[in-house]
Image (tube, helix red, strand yellow):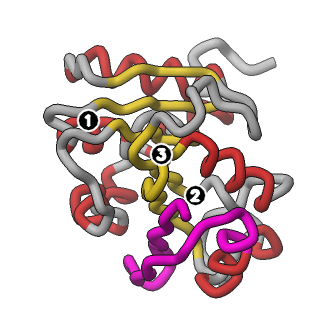
Amino acid sequence: MASSSEPTPQQDHIRRLLSPERAETLDSLRILSLCPINVHDTVADIGCGPGYFTLPLAKTLKNGRVLALDLNDEMLAACRDRVDKARMGNVEILKCSEFEFPIEPASVDGAFLAFVVQASSDKDRFLSAVRETLQPRGWCSVLEWYKKETEWGPPLERRLDPGELEVVAREAGFRTMGWRDINGDHYIVTLRNT
């Protein structure tokens, strides 16, 4: 039996998601600069995890707000702790399920999805549910893994290359605005609600 001082697998995962090494390859401010964010927007950070992008989003949205959603209680607790320590008053933390978000339909300006599309059991249904939260012409930025072997990350069979993601997004009712390489392992696609 493990002692109570040993971190759980989930705590190890949270630590890795917030590590300085990760920040070297995933510069949150550079990534957010590629999103069509307006300082007044309300943005849903769906699959926020421990808040790696939530805090930079909140700082970017000086006159807006962030809805940080996740289905995992430990991730939400880690995010809440980081938001509280940073004293970010424009973040609301919400528990969701994979396809249902506690957000009024057509109520957010944008959605930010970091490495969550690949994790979905039904990618088309997931993106359709995200699209329902967006206002007409709302934006959705999707950060994902290329479909290639990397040192860590999701199994190869779950990953989508940009072209595959564009097809799924189109089937969910989005129009692709373009995509950019981030670091050779990750890319970002910007979608628009049609």
Answer with mark 3 or mark 1, whichever residue precedes in sequence.
1
Image: magenta residue range: 168-194
Give the residue furthest to the left: 62
Q: Return the disc, 2 or 3, that comes first in the chain's sequence.
A: 2
- Kind of residue sitting beneath label 3: Gln
- In the rendered image, which residue does mark 2 sit on? 115
User: Within 10 Å of the Cα at label 1, are there few (<14), some (14-19), or many (20+) other Cα atoms?
Assistant: many
Determine the residue positioned at 44% across, 77% down: 177
Count of numbered marks: 3
Give percent across and percent down for residue 151. 59, 72
The residue that label 3 is drawn on is 135
Disc 1 from disc 2: Cα separation: 19 Å
User: Is residue 160 located in the magenta-colored stretch of the structure?
Assistant: no
Give the camera-side residue of 188 and 149. Answer: 188
- Name which of mark 1 and mark 2 comes first in the sequence: 1
Location of mark 1 (residue): 58
Confirm or deny contact between disc 1 and disc 2 (CB under 8 A). no
Label 3 SS: strand
- Identify the amino acid type marked 2: Phe
Q: Nearer the viewer, mark 1 or mark 2?
A: 1
Q: Are marks 2 and 3 in contact (CB under 8 Å)?
A: no
Q: Secondary structure at mark 1?
A: helix
- Residue 51: quarter of image: top left
Would residue 149 be seen by someone viewing this image from the given angle? no
